[in-house]
Image (cartoon, grey):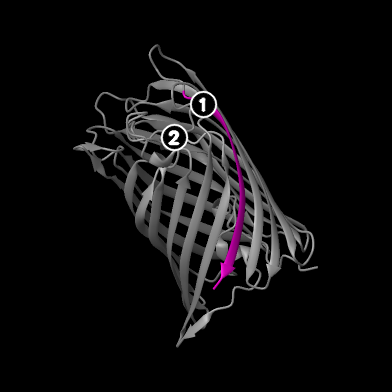
Amino acid sequence: MKGISKLSLAIAMAGYGMTAMAAVEDAGHVDMGPVEVTPMATLAIGHDDNVFREGEGTLANKSSTVMNVDASAAFKAQQGMSTYEATLAAKNTSFTSESDANFVDYGVTGLIHQEFNSRNRLDVDFDFGRYHDAGSTVDGADNKEAPEFTRTKGGLKYGFGSTEAMMRADLFGSYNKQKYQETAGEKEGSDRKTTEYGATAYYRFMPKTDALVEIKQRELDYTDEQGAGYDITSYLVGLNWEATAKTSGYAKVGRRYRDASASDVDRQGYTGWEVGVSYLPVDHSVFQLSTSRDYGLESENPQTAEFTQGTTTGLYWTHQWTAKISTNANYSYTDEEVQNRFGVSQKDRTIHQFGLSVDWNVMRNATVSLSYENTDRDESARLVGVDESGYKRNVYMLSGTIAL
């Protein structure tokens, strides 16, 4: 049986769903001097029983056969302990019964890990491309196209001090902007921008266990809406550990303070947290748990300039049953308030999401996958006249991935 060889520490980035690269047992590559190139292609067909993710109205429960065609080329170079990666990718999504909702996403993503020496290291990530808000529409039933936006995203983290030293620190920053296209002179969604920067200091008081203090500032902004923004300042303390070969994780808790761009809005503060734990009971199975309580931009409806405040918890399980067959299961629960720019709660929202996939490595460079995804969203208005847009959705997909 092929085991899972590494216990992941990146809980917050784990999520659900394997990339095409990860789904192939041994993708291989084409050597182009110091650069390894891996072209890949994925073809998927399935059924979506709620294409527009609506619970009532003319677009409610519109079902369709869905087809995805993905093509990508991954480039990787390595020098000593440093690695440089970039991926060019395009994805076509087509609905046979709702062709107005078809769209094509494309972009370039990348990761850089630079080891200057044992005390200095730098991690950089980026994402530039043209994407769509799947499941949303530009103008309801009158224009069922998915809102299109250009993403400009980047992040970096600079680490100072050996990872085994008694004291070390990380400085970090990120930028994420979504600029929506125009249709008939009107924006397809509210342009939005998130900027974050801060520092984390670690103190090793036990082997493989660090105490930490983190201070960070995050700016949430709808750039076309005057006064529609918040500055979130977080003061967190906690632990970072890799206690055994089977368990690792982090836990941060503290106060988050929100200052509004709109005038006459009082500063607000509440307790927030970020927690992630990995557990590897055997070398071919891993469980991951993550939970966070924070503020955010509204992602369910890009046409509104609203904000969220709530908690999201996720549980993920990956298991390698044989050398060829593995499964991935996930469940997440979100409980949040949707608020306007003045911090007034508009509605309460809960979201249950469940997913399961079975992957079969048919050949060294080819994988067949069968997946299922269920979403159950419920909304309850707090004010008269506020729309409640709850829905239920099931998606079944059969896909094949091959490294060319």
- Depth check: give the residue in front, 144 or 7: 144
Q: Where residue 66 sits in the image (x, y, percent)?
A: 52, 45
Residue 306 in which image quadrant: top left
In the picture, measured across the screen, residue 155 lies left or right of residue 334, that is: left
Q: Which residue is mark 2?
A: 300
Q: CA distance from mark 2 to mark 1?
A: 11 Å
Q: Determine whether 4 is above or below 102 in the image.
A: below
Expressed as whole percent of the image width and height from the top left, the position of residue 277 reads 66, 51
The disc label shown at residue 202, or none = none
| Quarter where residue 399 is shown | bottom right
Q: Position of residue 282 (x, y in %)?
A: 80, 60
Is 121 drawn above or below residue 359 in the view shown?
below
Q: Residue beneath label 1, please? A: 349
- Residue 140 seen in render: yes
Mark toward the start of the polypeptide (2 vs 1): 2
Three-letter code for the amino acid on which mark 2 is drawn: Glu
Q: Secondary structure at mark 1?
A: strand
